[in-house]
Image (spheres, rainbow, N blue to C red):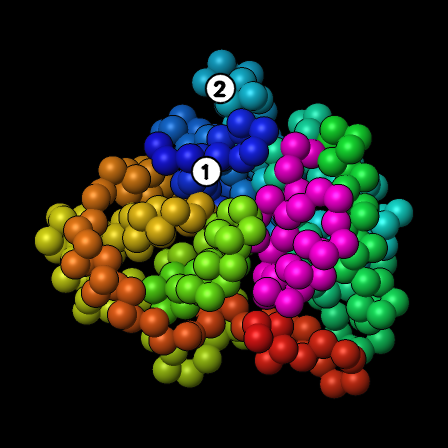
Amino acid sequence: MKTLAYKNGDQMPALGLGTWKSKPGEVEKAVYEAIKIGFRHIDCAPIYGNESEVGEGIKKAINEGIVSREDLWITSKLWNDSHRREDVIPALQNTLSDLQVDYLDLYLIHWPVALKKGVGFPESSEDFLSLDEVPITETWEGMQDAYRQGLVKHIGVSNFNINKLNEIINECKVAPAINQVEMHPFLPQNELLNFCNSHDIHMTAYSPLGSGDRPEKMKKDNEPTLLEHEVIESIANTHGCSTAQVLIAWALERGTAVIPKSVNKERIQQNFNASEIKLKQDEIDTINALDYEYRFVDGEAWDLAGNSYEASKFWD
């Protein structure tokens, strides 16, 4: 299994299990089965509404002696309603309690968006706090507090562009360890990847398979389908594998982490086996040429009339 190395010697498994959209009643078993199969990296977040079940799956695997806590890499995220410095550690402690662990390996700012306390998803501009009221640098101070207290081993961000990363890099005492963003052949994020590589920031690809199971309200008419693209299908046929496995193998070949989601035992096994697939350079080049600059998760949930967040500015 490929790993991503950190300056302190820690090794993060590059292939992880994503839990976004994993339904209650399914995710506990999925996490448990994934660990049995060999996954050691679990990615979760409180806004997914399933961290308690994720914790039960982890606990079961540990209690049965399949793994120890130290064998696992557990990532979670700070939701947008806890961006004030004093709110970061209480939010983290709720996550630790739900997951039934004493520390996280990685804790991320989920979005560069601040919401009022108690808001899950905003319904109007009144639900937001501007980044003038709660700057990203204040939130990062809270993340650094958590790091200094030993509650997290590494801290990072998610859905951050180069400008937002620079805001932290220019002010921080502890640099971001990772940036988790949507990344796949339709959106390879080459400029952002090069920037992160040059600043020793690892990257994790979410929605690596195109997120076809995301809520209908997030979808657009006639959007492209990664899993059925003729180029991906052709390469999959050559290797005798699934298109999902090709997409995972491509992400790993780029030196990024990747967190495909599944609650199906057979697909979880297939996703794990993708780490053994070796793509040829000409296949990689062909996949790289698919860059459509297409986002499946475009941030429009934050683009409500009357607030200071605009989806189009998130990614520039």
What's the residue at 68%, 73% (across, down)? 302
Which quadrant would the N terminus be assigned to in this image?
top left
Looking at the image, the residue that sits furthest to the top is 65
The numbered dot on residue 4 is 1
- Residue 181 rendering spot, x and y as whole percentages: 52, 58
- Residue 2 rendering spot, x and y as whole percentages: 37, 35
Q: Which marked residue is nearer to the observer: mark 1 or mark 2?
A: 1
Callout 1: helix, strand or loop? strand
Instruction: Determine whether 223 is above or below 191 in the image.
Output: below
The numbered dot on residue 67 is 2
Instruction: Determine whether 64 is above or below 185 in the image.
Output: above
Q: Amino acid at mark 1?
A: Leu
- Residue 83 rendering spot, x and y as whole percentages: 80, 55
Q: Nearer the viewer, residue 129 or 215?
A: 129
Q: Indicate whether residue 176 is drawn in magenta.
A: yes
Callout 2: helix, strand or loop? loop
What's the residue at 14%, 62% (across, down)? 234
What's the residue at 54%, 43% (across, down)? 43
Q: Residues within 10 Å of mark 2 (few under 14, many from 20)?
A: some
Q: Indicate whether residue 156 is drawn in magenta.
A: yes
Q: Amino acid at mark 2?
A: Val
Instruction: Determine whether 130 is above or below 159 in the image.
Output: below
Range of residues picked out in magenta: 152-179
Q: Residues within 10 Å of mark 1 (few under 14, many from 20)?
A: some
Q: Earlier in the sequence, mark 1 or mark 2?
A: 1
Q: Nearer the viewer, residue 188 or 304?
A: 188
Which quadrant would the C terminus be assigned to in this image?
bottom right
Looking at the image, the residue that sits furthest to the left is 238
